[in-house]
Image (cartoon, rainbow, N blue to C red):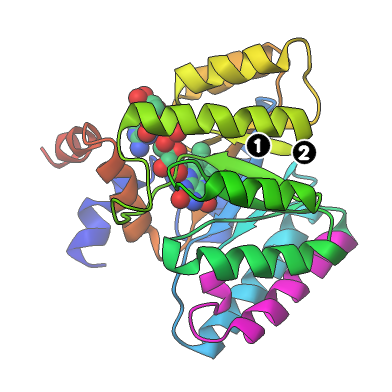
Amino acid sequence: MGLKETLVLPVARHWISGVNMDSALKDARAANSKGIGVVVNFLGEEIKEPSTADAHAKEYVRLQQALADGGIRGFPSVKLTQLGLAINEEEARRRLEVVASNADRLGQLLWVDMEGSRFTDATISTYLEAHDSHKGLGLAVQAYMRRSEQDLKRILDRGGKVRLVKGAYKEGRDSVFTTRDEVRQNYSKLLELLFKGGDGFAVATHDSVLIDKAKEMAGTRREGFRFEMLKGIRDELKAGLSKEGYKVFEYLPYGDEWYAYSRRRIGEHPSNVWLLLRSLF
Ligand SMILES: Cc1cc2nc3c(=O)[nH]c(=O)nc-3n(C[C@H](O)[C@H](O)[C@H](O)COP(=O)(O)OP(=O)(O)OC[C@H]3O[C@@H](n4cnc5c(N)ncnc54)[C@H](O)[C@@H]3O)c2cc1C
């Protein structure tokens, strides 16, 4: 085991389930026992080798089966570049077809993560094409992207399902809203579109201002949408929403590629560095 694994992995377990599927299934059962559903992600992105992309697709099929066999309330979320989108779009579509067909067979939903803006067009077109024959397929839309209002309208027109997030990638200033207030404003605007015309959508944020907005828009409604949050972040809020009768799901990542994911979590909330440092001394 290298230095990174010895020093950082124990802290990273705050946000990731562990390096193998068993650890994710264990966390999934624990979440379910508290009334919280799970969205499980096998970590990996921008795969360069077709054989690795094949292995990732197989891992998702295994994960879907394990969730079904374990009677777990939850489903996976996949990145298209881990199915090979960055090397060959057609092959990535074929692999998505395998995973999405398996989801249908098992009666599960399947989310597609949204990645950096280089992949937005290809991700949306791949998603829309697959969604025509797999209605349980949903796609993340990032509120920090200026283009997202148009994208969301296009997806909703085709009956797509959406998970609304703020967005986690470093992007050029021209393509994104840069201040916290602007991102919040756009998130609220897109949320309104979802409450008007969406079904089975997810409000994926830990931001109390936006969660309160969503609750206001929902009124007495509890069906047709859910709150989704990441593992290890705002656990009391998750429990509180669940108690109020909202559907709450937790995003559980697992796998060897935990380092890049953890860096992203630390980057968006620098106080997590203290969590890291505290564990070292
Ligand atoms: C279920 C789910 C799926 C996601 N899928 C994608 C995706 O497909 N593509 C994509 O680009 N992004 C995705 N994201 C990440 C998202 O884009 C944001 O980067 C992330 O959720 C932080 O934004 P926020 O809305 O919570 O708001 P923020 O303003 O970042 O946070 C609001 C509050 O939440 C708490 N908080 C937030 N992050 C942390 C943290 N790391 N550690 C400790 N406290 C924290 C703090 O109290 C903070 O004040 C996903 C997020 C979730 C919840």
**Which quadrant would the C terminus be assigned to in this image?**
top left
Q: Is mark 1 within 8 Å of ligand 1?
A: yes
Label 1 secondary element: strand
User: Which image quadrant for residue 220?
Assistant: top right
Residue name at image x 64 percent, y 85 percent: 91
Asked if the residue at tag 2 contacts the one at tag 1, i.e. Cβ–Cβ closer than 8 Å, the answer is no
Residue 162 or residue 279, whichever sits in front: 162
User: From the viewer's perspective, is residue 43 above or below residue 265?
Assistant: below
Residue 106 or residue 21, whichever sits in front: 106
Quadrant for ligand 1 reads: top left
Q: Which residue is mark 2?
A: 200
Q: CA–CA distance between discs 1 and 2?
A: 7 Å
User: Which image quadrant for residue 85?
Assistant: bottom right
Residue range highlighted in magenta: 80-105
Residue name at image x 76 percent, y 69 percent: 129
**Which quadrant would the N terminus be assigned to in this image?**
bottom left
Residue 75 or residue 83, whichever sits in front: 83
Q: Residues within 10 Å of mark 1 (few under 14, many from 20)?
A: many
Q: Looking at the picture, how far across and down is residue 122, in whole percent?
A: 57, 71
Residue 174 visible (yes or no): yes
**Residue 48: within the magenta?**
no
Q: Amino acid at mark 1?
A: Ala
Residue 273 circle label: none
Q: Which residue is mark 1?
A: 202
Residue 232 visible (yes or no): no
User: From the viewer's perspective, is residue 38 above or below residue 206?
Assistant: below
Residue name at image x 50 percent, y 51 percent: 147
Q: Looking at the picture, how far across and down is residue 271, in whole percent?
A: 22, 31
For residue 261, side relative to residue 199 (left or right): left
